[in-house]
Amino acid sequence: MAMVKEKKLSAETISAQALHQIDEMTGGITPAIHPSSTFLRDENYQLINARHSYGRDENPGYAVAENVLAELEGASAALLFSSGMAAAMAVVQSLRPGDHIVAPRVMYWGLRNWMSKFCDTWGLGLDLFDSADPVALANTIRKGKTRLVWIETPCNPTWDVIDIAAAAESAHAAGACLAVDSTVATPVLTQPIKHGADIVIHSASKYLNGHCDIIAGALVTAREDELWERVCEVRTQAGAILGSFEAWLLQRGMRTLFLRVRKACESALAFAQHFDGHANVGAVIYPGLPGHPGHEIARRQMDGGFGGMLCIQVKGGAEAALNVVKRCKVFTRATSLGGVESLIEHRYTIEGEGSPVPRDWLRLSIGIEFVDDLIADFEQALG
Ligand SMILES: Cc1ncc(COP(=O)(O)O)c(C=O)c1O
């Protein structure tokens, strides 16, 4: 009988069915939650299941989300963490004193600030580059010294789009590895490993979970090499592990990832186009608009949309911008991104003194509501 080659399932199917991982014990089509912090040994003191000894090493409930994420990213393995910050720091903590890191000046501010402090105390070198300048990254790398090139694309909050393949080429030529924070793009729009990245980071608190009800992080790797072994060790030994219920919520959230991200992209584009050129708007900062500096790279690198995040520069300065926030009724005034409901925030207030974000910018996370409601709300708020 002729062998029928099994057709590889699409990413949407993999995501919706969570790889069709059925609970072995019960046949449940959703996984069980495993709150146990410790695991039985038999009378000969052998573990009942060799993988499970203590809850800080590994939780049986992690595998569903980790397997799905690894598959969606085209990765060799994935690891869940207690937050996006913990995931990112596990990569940085896996370096050795004297190693050098290159990172963009514009990126998630919490991580940039923490990296600067951490590198200082741990004897790591750190140089920041201008992500809007296409040659700055390559010029900041120090051959033989730089061990980690860190990028975020699209990056917070300018949504500059960094060419992952070019960054990977520069990093690898210098003997460094490339880590990509792909929180905003998600595997729906970009799979950094296909473009040459070695490690991908997600704040799973955002789109992967999608409901603003957990704090979680994830890393995926192109290969299970020495760096990855150290990353695994950092999670186990330093203990930045995810709770069992949060891991369960994450696998549930990821089942609707494609629907949510596609809807957010569609609405963000319609929203951006509507307010581009509006009398009370100085600029709409969105990579889906042809005038955005990252548009051409985004068209090549992002598949099926430009993301759900954008910024609006309000004419009239900081006060006018804060007045718009005050008048919004449909947008929710809160920090964060990637949830089903649309959020509006004044980034400068969140980041505080020294923030590079202009005071007349508002950051919007477009959710899955009816886009006309969002447009009407922002229109009335602009006055
Ligand atoms: C792009 C990006 N990376 C990382 C993080 C940190 O993630 P978490 O808040 O889950 O620790 C955030 C949080 O806002 C983020 O926006």
Image: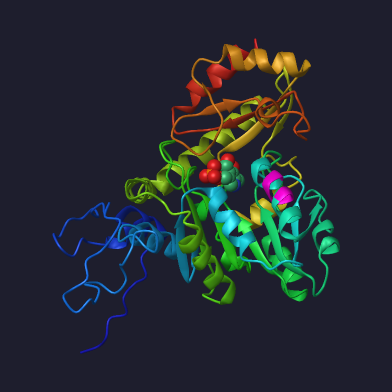
Question: On the rendered image, what quadrant is the C terminus found in?
Answer: top right
In the picture, measured across the screen, residue 43 lies left or right of residue 205, that is left
Tell me where residue 136 sits by quadrant.
bottom right
* 151 falls in the magenta region: no
Residue extending furthest toward the left: 26
How many numbered badges does the structure rendering display? 0
Residue 199 position within the rendered picture, expressed as x and y whole percent measured from the top left: 58, 64
Q: Is residue 29 left or right of residue 271?
A: left
| Residue range of the region highlighted in magenta in the rendering | 113-117
Q: Position of residue 57 (x, y in %)?
A: 39, 64
Residue 223 image offset from top left, x and y in percent: 53, 74
Is residue 115 inside the magenta stretch? yes
Residue 329: x %, y % from top left? 50, 15
Compare residues 104 and 328 and report the one nearer the observer.
104
Identify the residue at horizontal 39%, vertical 59% (top origin): 56
What colour scheme was applied to this rendering of the protein? rainbow
Foreground residue, 308 or 77? Answer: 77
Would residue 67 be found to the left or right of residue 30 on screen? right
Which residue: 52% across, 59% down? Answer: 219
* In the rendered image, the vertical position of residue 80 relative to residue 325, given as above or below: below
Q: Quadrant of ligand 1?
A: top right
Residue that appears at 71% across and 40% down: 158
Question: Which image quadrant: the N terminus?
Answer: bottom left
Say whether residue 303 is visible: no
Residue at position x 86%, y 62% from top?
A: 139
| Magenta span: chief secondary structure | helix
Residue 218 shown left or right of residue 301 in the figure: left
Q: Is residue 33 visible?
A: yes
